[in-house]
Image (cartoon, rainbow, N blue to C red):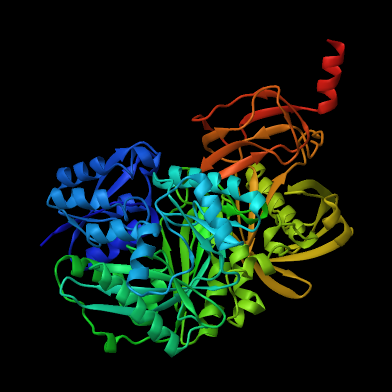
Amino acid sequence: MFTKILIANRGEIACRVMRSARALGYRTVAVFSEADRHAPHVSLADEAVLIGPAPVGQSYLRAEAILDACRKTGADAVHPGYGFLSENCTFADKCQAAGITFIGPPVNAIELMGSKRLSKIAMIEADVPCIPGYEGADQNEDTLIREARRIGFPVMIKASAGGGGRGMRLVFEDSELAEQIRTARSEATNAFGSGELIIEKALIEPRHIEIQVFADTHGNAVYLGERDCSIQRRHQKVVEEAPSPFVDEDLRQRMGKAAVQAALSCQYVGAGTVEFLVDRDRNFYFLEMNTRLQVEHPVTELVTGFDLVEWQIKVAAGQRLPVSQEEVKLRGHAIEVRLYAEDPATQFMPQTGQVYKWQPAQGVGVRIDDGIRTDQVISPHYDPMIAKVIAYGEDREEARRRLVRAVQDCQLFGVTNNQHFLANILQHPEFAAGHATTAFIGQHFVQDVSMQPPSPSQEVGALASLLFYHHQHRADAPHFNWWSANHSPWPCELACGNTTLELNLYSEGGQRFSISCNANATERTAARDETRKIDITVVTLTHETLRYELDGVQQTLNYLIKDRQLFLHRQGVTWTFQDKTHQPAEAAAGSASGVIKASMDGAIVNVLVNAGDTVRKGQTLVILEAMKMEHPLKADRDGTVERLQVKAGDQVKIRQVLVTLAPEDAHSATEATA
């Protein structure tokens, strides 16, 4: 028996666990780092304990700090959430030794399934279908290269520990093999503390299907249907749904029985997910087993009607599973997307900064699992996922339609995110038809508009000028009637990404405005737009919403003016404008400046050059680690390393100068003079 549960995690999953724990009558305890002092999960808990500085190695990964928090608060159970220590067998063992219930599987099961190498060996012995590959103990680089060649390209290199796409590399050619093995090993070591790798034959364009299993301490085990997680980028899931549009009842039963067999073979207890790759002929192969709650568990909850966190807690307390396999019924359809602080236009680079506004969508069948609030700072120390947007429907199309609207209606200002990208995926004909595989993004989204910086139309620029005009007159002359006719133009110059708009606004009276717009922008925008006059009538205007009429149609635009920036949001697209009207002209910076800056806050993992080295455009100079991923920073031109201002282990800030390159001709001239 236990009465108080400490959640050894943060963000949306900590909030999610607390809601179910409180509904069951348990007291809850949060732990937090210095960076999370004002995070929502801290205030939601009955008690909260500071466990260290922002870096995870000094806070959320410190088992002793978490156990000490249990002692301070009297917590007699720990729910690990997902990530961090959720699949750490040493932590689970320490909880048990301290007399604290670990709400998760037994230590032996975590240890076995926490190793892709050992778990695959165990699944082969349990007659669970597995992908051909190498899972040997010899981790010598020469051995791995030899085995990859034996398997045949393409191959997938995988970190034996952990998940989330870290330490994974798809290799098509022998010439890439050695470098990709080293990169995967380095990333795995930094993320999971283990550089052990396995190699598998890469299946091209498979489906990624996973089965939710649950087992109790009385020998009962069930599967709760499947989830289709095929849409991925960098081997990280983007969209998840239940049930899969690809899986029929026969395949569901075969995979379900195999998943239960996998769980029973390691005396599993609690929630677990057995992941499979499925080819076009519906042959399935064991991928891995996650010994924890999954990020995508809400879609299973919505189609089964079960609260999986409630089940976890009850099973940990010794209770039997509440249903038998025959009583598990799937009803309707649910789809989930992951809202990330990342920039799809820069190869999904994680983003940091302050959340100026967060207003999640609402609606029938819509569920939002989040862990952020307005004014919170997104730091570089944690995973960039900030919320999950989920929708349920009686059928797949209703769920998809509801989710499109929900994604578009969420308002997130201040941090670049993947909202437009998600909405476009959900509206793509291939996804709507249920045909998407793991190759979907690579095949259909390389040139998608959501993968480019938002480029405003002249209409959007005109609306921005109108809001800047209103904001300035309200600030400068609060009693000024800005609706009055004023035929003298109000000029402004607005910048949005690569686009610069020159506008002149005229107030026609009666809430009517006329704006002339001239684009001076990138070739793409300039070719599309021409100077034109735009007539707008304001219907209503509040401090955050503009209702307007343009070309006989009324529409609504959400906005926010903060720190001299104007954020405009409409149907999933956010534009950020800066008023350049009174700023001095800036010299245009060359696209290849030779100044290599940090792409975000983070830690330097490796420096691959020395001062005086000659480098080529595209050569990796420095490797930056942030948000659990390694990011190579490359030379933007040929040249010579003139200044090296960083070393391995340094913590750096976004846009901090790391390396300065001198052009090759300048270096040659210096040598000739000498």
Residue 485 lies in what quarter of the image? bottom right
Q: Residue at x 55, y 27 (%)?
A: 647
Quadrant of the image containing the C terminus: top right
| Residue 21 visible in the snapshot | yes
| Residue 629 visible in the snapshot | no
Quadrant of the image containing the N terminus: bottom left
In the depicted view, which residue is nearer to us: 560 or 649? 649
The x, y position of residue 566, in whole percent, is: 65, 50
Residue located farthest toward the left when viewing the structure as drawn: 1
In the depicted view, which residue is nearer to us: 252 or 23? 252
The x, y position of residue 140, in whole percent, is: 47, 45
Above or below residue 213? Residue 623 is: above
348 horizontally vs 526: left or right:
left
445 horizontally vs 210: left or right:
right
Above or below residue 428? Residue 595 is: above
The x, y position of residue 205, in whole percent, is: 60, 72
Label count reads: 0
118 horizontally vs 454: left or right:
left
The x, y position of residue 3, in whole percent, is: 13, 59
Above or below residue 191? Residue 213 is: below
Q: Residue at x 17, y 76 (%)?
A: 320
In the depicted view, which residue is nearer to us: 250 or 322? 250
In the depicted view, which residue is nearer to us: 523 or 91? 91
Q: Residue at x 39, y 58 (%)?
A: 117
Q: Residue at x 46, y 47 (%)?
A: 188
Residue 220 lies in what quarter of the image? bottom left
87 horizontally vs 403: left or right:
left
